[in-house]
Amino acid sequence: MMNCQQATRLMSEAQERPLRLREKVALKLHLLICTGCKNFSTQIPWLSQLMKAHAQGQDQQASPPTGQ
Amino acid sequence: MIPADDPSAPVTPQAPLHDAAFMADLRQLMLRFATLQLSNAHAAEDAVQEALVGALKNAQSFSGRAAFKTWVFAILKNKIADTLRLQQRSVNASSLLSDPDDEEALDELFDRRGHWQTDERPATWSNPQACLQQQQFWVVFETCLNALPPQQARVFMMKEYIELDTPEICNAVGVTTTNLNVMLYRARLRLRECLENRWFVQGERA
């Protein structure tokens, strides 16, 4: 059975290359029983979006902190 | 006729270019980014200069600072991508990967069997879309990005922002695909953890 370290490594690598069927199945099984890794799996693609949004200057258009 | 300076006047398209402080800040930001990416001060200086000259040609079409900054960074990104694609490095991963402190710090996220330590287990991030609109979030994001070991930040940006593909990054940095995957993995682990600790969990506790 795959552990969290292996699962996170594979989820990161999935950003670089398509996973093999064997890897996908093992990962799916792990995610069924692991909420931490399940959260991780949605957050990793999000990091990529954040990097792009940041670089495209969305941060410049964001509204100032509330409470002033 | 050229209108006189009037503080209440709407921002004119050329305004960013006539704001010396804004331009100086922007240039600093560009230089920092280009220097990290190209690891060569001279090449970075050239790329920034070319990007600024390129952007000024179209300066009329910008409605403000944010649009101008976006444009000038898009040009800079292309210049850096071109330069990196032409660079050929021999594989020399040792200097990039041998950081025992970093390995140790990341190993602490997991227990001996490779499962998350209880207090390191990723939490649910509530409504992450909303953070895009909050200036304070971007301050945290930048802090977390700057906290990455420089070479991890560099390859993460090459991949996610400059959008080079794996062989191109390996070539430019001089690492194997396996090395690169490890560097990106560590960058993501670290960045994720930092954002969670400094923003998402904080926000929920508040």
Image: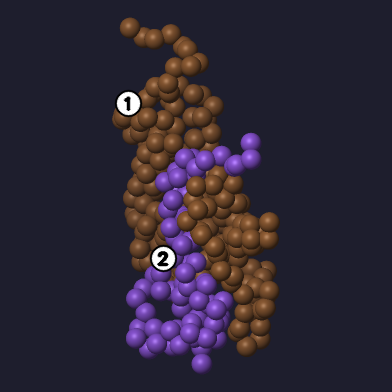
On the picture, is B201 further left or further right than B39?
Answer: right
Identify the amino acid type marked 1. Gln
The answer to whether residue B93 shows anywhere in this view is no
Q: Colour of chain B?
A: brown
Q: Which is nearer the N-term, disc 2 or disc 1?
A: 1
Real-space Cα separation, disc 2 to disc 1, in angstroms: 39 Å
**What secondary structure is found at the residue carrying circle 2?**
helix
* Identity, as a three-letter code, of the amino acid under mark 2: Cys
Element type where label 1 sits in the image:
helix
Of residues B64 and B26, the one drawn nearer to the viewer in this rendering: B64
Mark 2 belongs to chain: B
Task: Sort mark 1 into few (<14), some (14-19) or many (20+) by Cα contacts within 10 Å.
Answer: some
Judging by the rendered image, the residue that carries numbered circle 1 is B60
Q: Which residue is mark 2?
A: B170
Task: Tell me if residue B153 comes above or below residue A3 in the rendering.
Answer: above
The percent position of residue B170, horizontal first and vertical second, equals 41, 65
Taking the spot 51% from the left edge, 29% from the top edge, the residue there is B22
- Could you tell me which residue is drawn at 49 percent across and 51 percent down? B132
Depth order, front residue of A61/B18: A61
Q: Residue at x 44, y 51 (%)?
A: A53
| Chain A pictured colour | purple
